[in-house]
Amino acid sequence: KKVKVDTLHLTSNPLKWSVNEVVKFLKTTDCANLARICKEQDIDGQALLLLTLPAVQEFMDLKLGPAVKFCHQIERVKLAFFTQYAK
């Protein structure tokens, strides 16, 4: 049985996303409530792709559950970036 991967199709290169584009993306995910924090912390696409679980927990003051969900969304963006733009 194959596992269905929740693949993401990006319409633009996330390395070039502005803070507002990061916010717009997050609002389409189960982490919409974190969009405000990303805006307050000036997280653009490049910063988003560099975030790690420890950094998310420490600097965004998140409990493990929400931090892991947020990092899952970041991993989805990374996978789509490598598939679509890193050539």
Image (cartoon, rainbow, N blue to C red):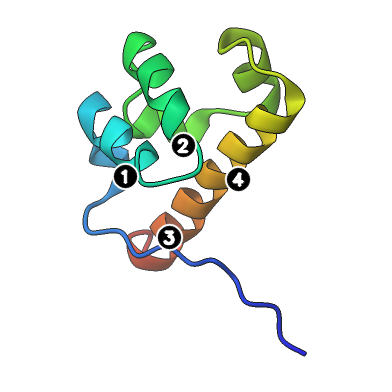
Q: Which label number is shown at residue 80?
A: 3
- Indicate the quadrant containing the N terminus: top left, top right, bottom left or bottom right: bottom right
Badge 1 or badge 3: first in the primary sequence? 1
Q: CA distance from mark 2 to mark 4?
A: 11 Å
Q: Which label number is shown at residue 28?
A: none
Q: Amino acid at mark 1?
A: Pro
Q: Mark 1 — residue?
A: 14
Q: Is residue 80 left or right of residue 65?
A: left
Badge 2 or badge 1: first in the primary sequence? 1
Q: CA distance from mark 4 to mark 3?
A: 12 Å
Q: Which label number is shown at residue 72?
A: 4
Q: Are marks 2 and 1 in contact (CB under 8 Å)?
A: yes
Q: Mark 2 — residue?
A: 49
As drawn, 37 above or below 65: above
**Residue positioned 33% across, 34% down in the render:** 45
Q: Residue 63: where, in percent of width, then height?
A: 72, 19
Task: Specify the quadrant of the image occupied by residue 11.
Answer: bottom left
Q: Are marks 1 and 3 in contact (CB under 8 Å)?
A: yes
**Residue positioned 39% across, 11% down in the render:** 41
Label 1: how many Cα within 10 Å (few below 14, some 14–19, many 20+): many
Q: CA distance from mark 1 to mark 3?
A: 9 Å
Nearest the eye: 71 or 87: 71
Q: Is residue 5 left or right of residue 8?
A: right
Badge 4 or badge 1: first in the primary sequence? 1
Q: Amino acid at mark 3?
A: Ala
In the current view of this chain or complex, which residue is farthest to the bottom? 1
| Foreground tag (4 vs 1) | 4
